[in-house]
Amino acid sequence: MSDDRAVTDDASPEETTAEGLLSVADLDAGYGDLQILSAVDLAVGAGEYVTIVGPNGAGKSTVMKAVFGLATYMDGAIAFDGEDISGLAPEEVIHRGVSYVPQNENVFAGLSVRENLEMGAYILDSVPEDRLESVFERFPILDERQSQRAGTLSGGQRQMLAMGRALMLDPELLLLDEPSAGLAPDLVDEMFDRIDAINDAGTAILMVEQNAMEALERCDRGYVLVQGQNRFTDTGEALLGDEEVRREFLGG
């Protein structure tokens, strides 16, 4: 890779993508008084697929939670669709057009599949049937198991349900935290294929993923975080081809 790769300590989100949907600049965030992120920059363009990778404890999920209002905002700027959302509560961020799928406890185990999906539309006056049908078309297994309790689904099916519920509001940006975590190896590619299809349909994706090789192969752009700070930013292809990135973060 050439020497002009983007190292985001020097690059602003505005420089990273021409049509910024999400723009994060100089973000400090953490939990309570514990600071995890320091001057993090990140951007997601309209319809773009962006992934965050890095070692355990790098602050990857904290970036996502800070955007969604689940981490403690300390300093910097978070803008979505040109409006400042720094420090807003999750219920306010949802109304702006952002949906979030956490890694753990991402379904209501005691509710049916259909009830889970209906919960995804809780901010609306009524459940839009066309959105339900769209989710069922995207995830046919959920249609087949509408009345089944979510807690009895397989890991892959629960992840599909969590994503389907997040899509009930037809978000402009979908935040995915470790979507392949805990899945059997033969289901990982299928899950990534489904994420590709969501993005191909026009929804921007910001994803945190430990399966860095697979994520970078599929995304438009990637960020490598280390100890709560930006280390590298570039296209997924360029990061995969960078010897230092491969040696330090991708296993050689």
Image (cartoon, rainbow, N blue to C red):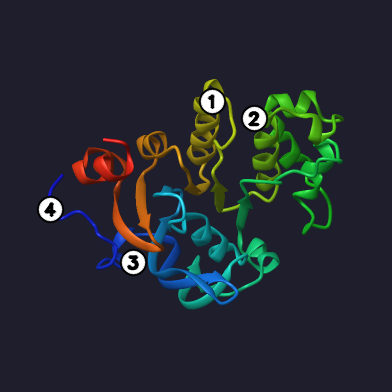
Disc 2 on helix, strand or loop?
helix
Q: Which of marks 4 and 3 is nearer the N terminus?
A: 4
Using the numbered discs, state the Cα–Cα distance from disc 1 to disc 4 in whole angstroms.
35 Å
Taking the spot 36% from the left edge, 53% from the top edge, the residue there is 223
Q: Mark 4 points at which residue?
A: 3
Amino acid type, residue under disc 4 in the picture: Asp
Q: Are marks 1 and 2 in contact (CB under 8 Å)?
A: yes
Q: What residue type is labelled 1?
A: Glu
The residue at the point 62 percent across, 54 percent down is 99
> Where does the image place residue 12, in percent across and percent down from the top left?
31, 68
Image quadrant in which the N terminus is located: top left
Q: What residue type is labelled 3?
A: Glu
Pick the residue in front: 132 or 185. 185
Task: Report the residue that reaches farthest toward the top.
Answer: 186
Whichever of labels 4 and 2 marks the residue nearer the N terminus, that label is 4
Instruction: Please state which amino acid type lies under the numbered disc 2.
Output: Gly
Residue 60 at what x, y percent from top left? Answer: 47, 55
Which residue is disc 3 drawn over?
14
Q: Is mark 1 on a helix, strand or loop?
A: helix
Task: Please tell me which of labels 1 and 4 falls first in the chain.
Answer: 4
Callout 3 secondary element: helix
Q: Name the residue under label 2.
A: 156
For numbered disc 4, what is the local secondary structure? Answer: loop
Q: Which numbered disc flags the more N-terminal residue, 1 or 2?
A: 2
